[in-house]
Amino acid sequence: MSFPHVAPGRSVQRSPLSLDEAEIRRLSRHCLRYRDADDRMAWIQLSTTLGLFFLAAGLMLYGAASGAYALLALFLPAGGFLVRLFGVQHDCGHNSFFASRNTNRLVGRLLSVFTLTPFGYWSRSHAVHHTTAGDLGRRGIGDVDTLTVDEYAALPRGAKLRYRIYRHPLFLHVLGPPLYFILLQRSPFGQALPVQDAWRSIMGLNLALLLVYGGLVAAFGVAAVALAVLPTALLASWVGGWLFFVQHQFEDTHWEPSDEWTLQRAALSGSSYYVMPKVLQWFTGNIGLHHIHHLNPRIPNYRLQSCLDDEPALGTLSRLTIRESLQCIGLALWDPARRKLVAF
């Protein structure tokens, strides 16, 4: 079977719904060849990214403490490095970044201090997301809350207003991400999983954050630490929140009732291939190749591009350019009749 050549920057796309089961199985088998971790590549990625992050963060802290405020402009690359570190932590949660399960856990927990994301709890809830994404009967854990057209129409007026506020771009893309990453992740209560599953991970991280950032405050002062840390955390949360949104909340995404849902088809149809310039792809750890990641979450981020390059079909499925992704901002409801995500 042949597939069209995809010119750079051009959105050439085939509908994953047109794939038969044999083709889906073939693509799944192809991805299996890329699932093994390469510790050398993993350590190089971690050390270079962490080193660049520490350099930028250290210069920002020095600038805030000494009055060299021009150095605070480094929050832009620092935020990008933090997004990339979150990608490493994400892979560690899938036990895919390193060959050793223990090394994945150790590094994932250490990176939590910078990403502000409790490794153990987030990994468990994210694993649920991977086994339920696109399943209408199992919504609510690790995804953006999404109602169908009929479900929204049946809501009372107050509930409709709350859902509209939640799905409003100002809340979903500006206020929501930092609120979630910086504040809501500090409490084990109100999480998607039971409190007992969240308590140890979240409170353990809170203690680590208190020790690390409390020590920095004692050394440099509250104002200096806030000026160095908050802009970076805000930028990273906005980028991360947007990526998570656009990876599943696009017009031709995929939702099915539980009895018709299959993981492989949902991965290819309900997860986007977000086409970005190489520099942005680097900062985001190749997570834009999200359809491949959902098809096989054991593929480490540093092998996703090779998996894509070696199978032309994967480059034509669920493609979404940056310009096209901006049109997704107002989408809010799943319309089963049209099989599309639609606006209010």
Image (spheres, rainbow, N blue to C red):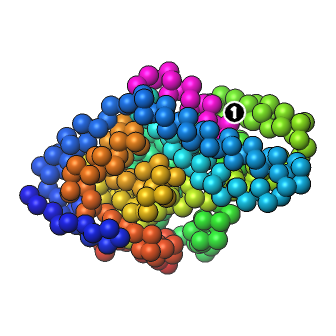
Residue for point 25% across, 55% down: 314
Above or below, 26 relative to 335: above
Q: Please determine whether, in this image, residue 71 is positioned above or below residue 198.
A: below
Kindly give the residue lying farthest to the left in the view shown.
1
From the viewer's perspective, tell me whether residue 49 is left or right of residue 98.
Answer: right
- Which quadrant is home to the N terminus? bottom left
Q: Quadrant of residue 8?
A: bottom left
Q: Is 79 placed left or right of 145 in the picture?
A: right
User: For the point 73% across and 31% down, which residue is it?
Assistant: 208
Residue 298 coordinates in the image, percent (x, y): 36, 36
Q: Position of residue 60 (x, y in %)?
A: 77, 50
Q: Residue drawn 54% across and 70% down?
A: 155
Q: Amino acid at mark 1?
A: Leu
Q: Is residue 316 above or below residue 82?
A: below
Depth check: 277 or 268 in front? 277
Residue located beneath label 1 in the image: 205
Label 1: few (<14), some or many (≥20) within 10 Å? Answer: many
Q: Nearer the viewer, residue 334 or 17?
A: 17
Secondary structure at badge 1 equals helix
Q: How many marks?
A: 1
The answer, for residue 226, to whether it is visible in the render is no
Residue at the image point whose x is 27% and y is 59% from the top: 315
Residue 133 position within the rendered picture, expressed as x and y whole percent measured from the top left? 40, 51
In the rendered image, is residue 87 in sight? yes
Magenta-colored segment: predominant secondary structure = helix
Q: Report the span colored magenta.
A: 99-117
Q: Where residue 4 appears, x then y in whole percent? A: 17, 67
Place residue 34 in its image quadrant.
Answer: top left
- Was residue 96 drawn as part of the magenta stretch in this picture? no
Magenta segment includes 100: yes
